[in-house]
Amino acid sequence: MSKGILFLLYTFTISISVLGQKNDFLTKFELTNQKETVTYEEGIAYYQMLADKFPEIKMQEMGITDSGKPLHLVLYSYDKEFDIQKNRSKRKAIFLINNAIHPGESDGVDASMMFLRDVALGKTLKKERKGTVFAIIPFYNIGGVLNRNSHTRVNQNGPVAYGFRGNARNYDLNRDFIKGDTRNAWAFWEIFNQLNPDFFLDTHVSNGADYQYAITLIATQKDKLSDHLSPLFEKEIKPFLYQQMEAYEEPMTPFVNVYGRKPDNGFNEFADWPRYSSGYAALFNTYSFMSETHMLKPYDRRVNATYQLIIAMGKSLASNKKEILESRRVADLEVMKQAEFPIKWELDAKDSTLISFKGYEGRYIESKITKQKRLYYDKSQPFERKIVYKNTYKPSLVIKKPSYYVIPQGWHSVLKRLKQNGVTMSTLKSDSTIDISKYLIKDYQTVKSPYEGHYFHYNVTMDIQNEKITFRQGDYLIPVNQVKNRYIVESLEPQAEDSFFKWNFFDMILASKESFSSYVFEELAEKVLLENPVLMREFELKKQEDEFFSKSRYVQLNWIYERSSYREKEFLRYPIFRIE
Ligand SMILES: [Zn+2]
């Protein structure tokens, strides 16, 4: 045989074996002309097959979800080392990807399968895979994935069939990260706490306005991120991701946070409060993201765009690894010492930037159904122009941290959440009288309709008072000197955006348990006033100034009751205390 024929045979054999190898691992998405996504069983079987073929891949079960099925976690480690602490000690980076939190938005499910296969085959991130552990949650909302249909993503352009947004108990899991109503969140906390990822990506598909982009990005709000992470995030990591997507000819824009109007007049950055995945992750100094592909773009393009973004993130993590690990180390040290914590934020309307935006001209035409004006995007008229983007948030409420929070042991639902999120705590060894500050709830408002299983409170105002309280042996002390400080403060300070108070964990204190009988309280009320001349003067003044008050015997007696020692101390007293 001539050298030429030998060479031809050789290349033919290679291409067959490469093709054969690739064919063995094709995903359902690839086998269906990029039109379909996997079912739960198919997805888990695929990862199991990868784990069987590649010793660098391991799949494990991480706690039961509301569906009754376990949450799976798939790990890729080039060294075949799956102990996270050992990987940490080798200075490996960790990249966690969460999929199917909204199972109708399945792009990341299919992209992650192809991604992990291609990493294992060395087809992508061949160099980068050596220094990073990839961790993939194939399906987070398993109950929703099992609830498969072809119509609930009403305006979405594929796949053929997909899961439903609500979980097995109809929770939206992307509102559940701090309050943890679901077992899915409990299993996630365990994963997150164990991995402590450097990068976190939660994959989605967006609704809202139309524009040219197939993919948009929610990067966790920069001002809520630690000062030790933000500069690297803003100057290196985010610009690189946008550049890479441009290079892949799939340009990306910040999440178009616009509903029911055209984006031409600009938009504001999405505020990812801790109830959302990326906002939760940011509490632990993780660089976090949500990808949002656009519902009207074809499924194949969306999945491939998500795949490219994952690769871009893998590259960014690898090329900035030293700085990323170091910035997180410093941020962790600083948060332990940090004395003040912003707990509420507002958009800084004055601070804006111009971004180049590729949109479609939109106009209002008459609706055939309602005869009203409706928004219509004209795809024959694409444009690119500068629009205003407001992405600065400033703290609107900052609190001084206490040295400790004291949590009486009966509040086990709160304690459970803190423990599951890795918060360190101790118990009182004996009954102890302690100088504390307590919050008295002055006012709050409540939404009129249930929201995610709750009647969420807002506009919370409080008084703070000092008192000596005797706590019992076994009550809990939470030191506010730990890496988890932000989770502690944001969950326990009643006024924080997503506090446990706002999420109804303490509604029992919002109604009094005891009361007085007005026909016999009269004599006691008189005694209360006689013994307290200041209160008596206040009472007389109120009678003069407040006509309603002066005319109601019950209201007057109640006013005295509320200011007397007869009133229960528990009413409106926030039951978690601060040691300053
Ligand atoms: Zn979503």
Image (cartoon, rainbow, N blue to C red):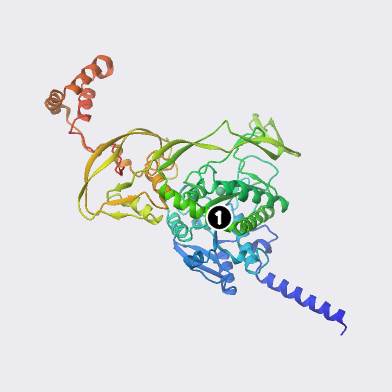
Q: Which residue is more in the foreground, 347 or 402?
A: 402
Residue most toward the bottom? 1
From the top left corner, tell me how far across and down residue 275 is, in percent. Answer: 47, 46
Identify which residue is drawn at 34% across, 50% down: 479
Classify residue 130 as left or right of residue 524. Answer: right
Work out which quarter of the rendered image holds the C terminus and state it.
top left
Q: Splitting the image into 4 quarters, where does residue 558 fall? A: top left
Circle 1 sits in a helix, a strand or a loop, which is it? helix
Q: Which residue is more in the foreground, 378 or 334?
A: 334
Q: Splitting the image into 4 quarters, where does residue 136 fall? A: bottom right
Classify residue 47 as left or right of residue 448. Answer: right
Question: Is residue 547 positioned above or below 500 on the image?
Answer: above
Amino acid of disc 1: Ile
From the top left corner, tell me how far across and down residue 119 is, in percent. Answer: 63, 65
From the top left corner, tell me how far across and down residue 345 is, in percent. Answer: 48, 37
Question: Is residue 168 positioned above or below 76 on the image?
Answer: above
Can the viewer see residue 298 in this picture?
A: no
Identify which residue is drawn at 53% across, 63% down: 91
Identify which residue is drawn at 49% across, 52% down: 330
Q: Which residue is more in the foreground, 39 or 332?
A: 332
Residue most toward the top? 544
Q: How many marks?
A: 1
Identify which residue is drawn at 23% across, 56% down: 429
Question: Is residue 169 positioned above or below 77 on the image?
Answer: above
Q: Residues within 10 Å of mark 1 (few under 14, many from 20)?
A: many
Work out which quarter of the rendered image holds the N terminus and state it.
bottom right
Question: Is residue 514 positioned above or below 156 on the image?
Answer: above
Q: Which residue is more in the foreground, 305 or 446?
A: 305
Instruction: Provide the residue designation for mark 1.
Output: 324
